[in-house]
Image (tube, rainbow, N blue to C red):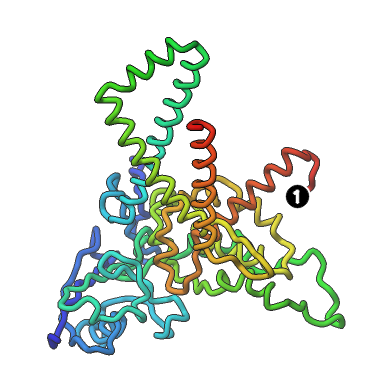
């Protein structure tokens, strides 16, 4: 007796309609602009990761001494790495802006019994960003 | 404005077809007609075999959700004239099994919906003699937005995560769980956390955000999921700091 081949949809019988199930394409994220934008947003994490690795390398070079730091700076000045840094900066900026705008959706802040508008939550993120950047600039450039 | 518009309607007969195909119908293009009116015109005047669900015709029952030109829409609230000169492609809701033509099988959603206990859970009911459970307008405001869900499942058809992972609880069910979690009369948040805090629950969501865009009632399921992620993370952190904390 032959064993029936497993099917993704149950075979049709008068009492058991056969449902049609469409398989999701591997390229689903290319079929709709909003999906592609989402994948792009997720991919910007690579830029964040690259920036973190460079930062860790800089800290390590600092701990090894002035010569190691200077060597690393020279390596980072190569055209390929400069281009990579510029691209990663753009990716980090895109990542930051999209997440700041999404943060208002994820956080419910109430003041005086009323929900704080999302615009204010996003704006507070930008203010915090500016304050921290300003503080770092003051520490490094004074 | 042109007098007619073409509709490409997905047809699928489980007895006859291996897969759906599009069938073109020409209907009058009237300014006050929605896509559902056009489908009813086809059913009444052109081809009585076209199968679809509908009921209230006023964006309340959530029955007539379909893909219109690739976007999940309530066909009773989608004007035909917005798609002039056409053609307009009408297909069954994406990511659901198709039963026939434009009718999808929704048992998966209904099962998940029940699992999150979308009702008021009380540890102990107070006696009727003590009266109603009163709420302030602020307490109502906490969950009102999420209570607007009409279970039309447009959000499921907008969500690629649900398409790729059928075990994902999904936007509407999570939003409805959050609706009851935020209700001051409810005491079932801990019971729901067992379902929601799983990988297929809130953590399956990657915040694509399309569910919120598709929602015809401005429920913002994506927002509700992210808000619940924060709640679950805080709960986890609390149990880490005080391991013996009861749920």
Q: Nearer the viewer, residue A12 or B213?
A: B213
Residue at image point 46% right, 12% down: A66
Residue at the far front in the pictured view: A142
Residue at 27 percent of width and 31 percent of height: A83
* Residue at 19% over, 72% down: B8
Q: Is residue B56 visible?
A: yes
Chain at tag 1: B
Which residue position holds label 1? Answer: B247
Image coordinates of residue A23 in percent, x first then y, are 31, 51
Q: Is residue B211 left or right of residue B149?
A: left
Categorize mark 1 by other alpha carbons within 10 Å: few (<14), some (14-19), many (20+): few
Task: Depth check: give the residue in front, B223 or A108.
Answer: A108
Q: Position of residue B150 (x, y in %)?
A: 50, 74
Q: Is residue A123 above or below residue A51?
A: below
Tell me if B203 is positioned left or right of B136 in this view.
Answer: left
| Quarter of the picture holding the N terminus of chain B | bottom left
Q: Quadrant of residue A74?
A: top left
């Amino acid at each position: 007796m032959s064993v029936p081949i497993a099917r993704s949809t149950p075979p049709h019988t008068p009492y058991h309609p056969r449902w049609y199930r469409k398989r999701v394409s591997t390229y689903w994220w290319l079929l709709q602009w909003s999906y592609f934008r989402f994948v792009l947003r997720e991919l910007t994490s690579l830029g964040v990761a690259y920036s973190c690795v460079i930062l860790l390398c800089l800290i390590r070079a600092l701990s090894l001494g002035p010569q190691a730091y200077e060597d690393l700076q020279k390596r980072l000045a190569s055209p390929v790495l400069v281009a990579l840094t510029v691209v990663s900066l753009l990716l980090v900026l895109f990542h930051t802006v999209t997440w700041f705008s999404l943060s208002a959706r994820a956080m419910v802040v109430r003041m005086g019994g009323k929900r704080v508008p999302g615009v204010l939550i996003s704006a507070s993120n930008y203010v915090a960003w500016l304050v921290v950047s300003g503080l770092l600039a003051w520490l490094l450039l004074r | 404005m042109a007098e007619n518009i073409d509709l490409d309607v997905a047809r699928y007969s489980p007895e006859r077809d291996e897969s759906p195909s599009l069938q073109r119908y020409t209907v009058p293009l009237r300014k006050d007609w929605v896509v559902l009116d056009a489908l009813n015109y086809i059913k009444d005047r052109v081809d009585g075999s076209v199968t679809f669900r509908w009921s209230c015709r006023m964006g309340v029952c959530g029955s007539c959700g379909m893909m219109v030109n690739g976007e999940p829409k309530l066909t009773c609230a989608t004007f035909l004239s917005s798609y002039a000169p056409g053609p307009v492609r009408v297909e069954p809701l994406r990511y659901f099994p198709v039963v026939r033509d434009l009718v999808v099988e929704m048992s998966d959603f209904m099962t998940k919906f029940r699992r999150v206990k979308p009702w008021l859970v009380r540890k102990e009911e107070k006696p009727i003699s003590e009266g109603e459970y009163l709420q302030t307008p602020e307490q109502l405001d906490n969950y009102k937005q999420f209570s607007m869900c009409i279970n039309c499942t447009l959000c499921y058809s907008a969500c690629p995560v649900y398409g790729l992972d059928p075990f994902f609880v999904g936007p509407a069910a999570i939003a409805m769980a959050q609706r009851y979690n935020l209700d001051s009369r409810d005491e079932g948040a801990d019971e729901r956390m067992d379902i929601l805090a799983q990988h297929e629950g809130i953590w399956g969501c990657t915040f694509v955000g399309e569910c919120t865009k598709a929602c015809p009632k401005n429920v913002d399921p994506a927002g509700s999921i992210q808000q619940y992620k924060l709640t679950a993370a805080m709960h986890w952190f609390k149990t880490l700091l005080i391991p013996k904390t009861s749920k």
